[in-house]
Amino acid sequence: MLKKVSVLLLLVLSITITSCNEDYLETKPTDAISAGDALSTPENMALVLNGLHRLMYAQQGIIPGGSNSRAGMQYWIPMFDVMCGDLIHTARSNGWMRAELQWNTHTVETTTTVEQLWYQRYHFIASCNAIINKVEEDGLTIDANMNNILGQAYAYRAWAYHSLVTTYAKGYLIGTPSTDPGVPLLFKTEAPYTSEPRSSVQVIYDQINDDISKSIDFFKNASQRVDKSQLDLNTAYGIKARIALSEGDWSAAADAAVKARQGYPLLNETGWKSGFNTTDLSEVIWGGRVIQSETTFFRSYFYYISPTFQGSQNRGNPKIINKEVYNMIPETDYRADLFLAKAPNTNGAAANGEGGSFQTDPNYSDAASFNQARRDNEAAWGITSRHNQHPFMHVKFRQKNPGTIDPDDVIYMRASEMYLIEAEAKAMMNDVTGAQAALKPLGEERDVAYDVTIFDTKEKLMDHIKFQRRVELYGEGFSWLDHIRWDEGIDLTNSGASQVLYQDGFMQAKPSVNNDWIWKIPQAEINANPNLTEADQN
């Protein structure tokens, strides 16, 4: 593989294993262990995994060829919702993710975005290969701790390959997996780190399924994790549920989803309205506990998404929900409270041209009511007077300390998603009763008037499940894969998005007939990898 990956193992072993006092802007750690020692003991292997846990939310400058303009999942999660118009920008602001929402990054092979996602995922793969191969080659004792280490390594590798094949290749359900080109497999852990050529999508899924099955087997006899940033049996089942859903293995998806959520009760109203800023929430299965001294500040998840973060991205660009989705939320559903339909449009630079004062905001006819509404929202949600507001803005993601740049946790997987995966899988199997049973606990918790029996056909169930995912999982990064799995295009005509701002992202044909849903392979990879040529470019 590309030379950027040829030194990958050395860097994951010598840079990412640092103390909690690491400054991500530094290029050399103060307490790194040598590459030779990193795999010498199970304890050191666990340190390698801890480096990967941090890399999930760290700035990518610690990866060869990486850029500090991306901070792992803190960037990718909101980006995948932004690109589909489910997490809508209201103004040009400082430009972050503008190119993504305009579809000008993943369609260009030289952009930072396509490079960073590719190399971060292969970074995980190379690191996991090192652990897996070392255990096998040396015949190390497989006790509870080693089961935990191998369970995490196989799960991370499955997760990384799944992320790659669902972005840099055609969707499993809308293509021909046996012949569609997937991504290169990488197994070596020594120079020259050359990957295989692009394998088919089916071959990649076979590898993914083999890895996640091994992960689950190891976790069944593993020691317990100590933090939700680490992977465990529930996490592995959650990853398996996502994989099976994306390839249409409905029975496996439903079964894994049920197992993944065991022990993680649904949030009640107080929990759902608390800000989604900590992995301590009851239904968080997996998430990054961001260490205070390692925060990425203006590259953090809350910088991109939170209406209370003290940064220019949200002060000038509050994010809104798609109006069509909001208008479907029943008044009896408490989630509607976190989308402020009547928030005053205080931004004179708003993309819809209706901001700045009561004179341009159609919801208000006088300055007094306009200004009072702004003050009321500030008092209720921790929005500062420096932050602009906008109709339909969300207040779902709020900091523990609003109005600061303090770090907060990043959530990767929740029990709610697993209920929705089970429901979709059952619906796709024409198991109406089973799908209703899966939806019932979630629906009744969120809506006091919820009646699941009205969704009594596969078609009604699927429409409702799509609605539930767009509300329940808003801002949590699932829109891209949902659109591909459902073969749905993008039409933001009545969403509240500005066509002038969104440009090509305002309307896109469905993925089965539109290859722009397939990410470009980094040109740097094609230039350097002897097993890839220009003919391999998407």
Image (cartoon, rainbow, N blue to C red):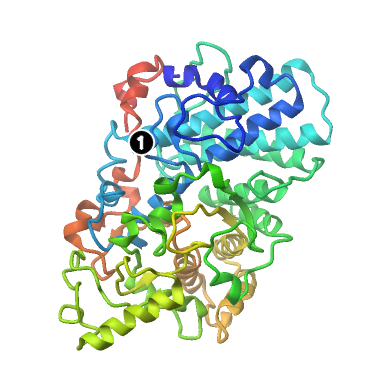
Q: Which residue is mark 1?
A: 114
> The C terminus is located in which quarter?
top left
| Camera-side residue of 530 and 132 | 132
Residue 39 is situated, as x and y percent measured from the top left of the image, at 69, 21
Q: Is residue 331 above or below residue 486?
A: below
| Camera-side residue of 392 and 33 | 33
| Quarter occupied by residue 306 | bottom left
| Camera-side residue of 165 and 138 | 138
Q: Is residue 233 above or below residue 51?
A: below
Label 1 is placed on what type of residue? Val
> The N terminus is located in which quarter?
top left
| Quarter occupied by residue 20 | top right
Does residue 47 appear to the left or right of 484 in the view shown? right
Residue 383 is situated, as x and y percent measured from the top left of the image, at 40, 69
Residue 136 is situated, as x and y percent measured from the top left of the image, at 73, 20
Residue 448 is situated, as x and y percent measured from the top left of the image, at 57, 85
In the image, what residue occupies the spot 18% across and 64% down? 349
Does residue 129 appear to the left or right of 78 in the view shown? right
- Camera sees residue 92: yes
In the image, what residue occupies the spot 55% across and 34% down? 22
In the image, what residue occupies the spot 66% across and 43% down? 230
- Camera sees residue 487: no
| Quarter occupied by residue 270 | bottom right
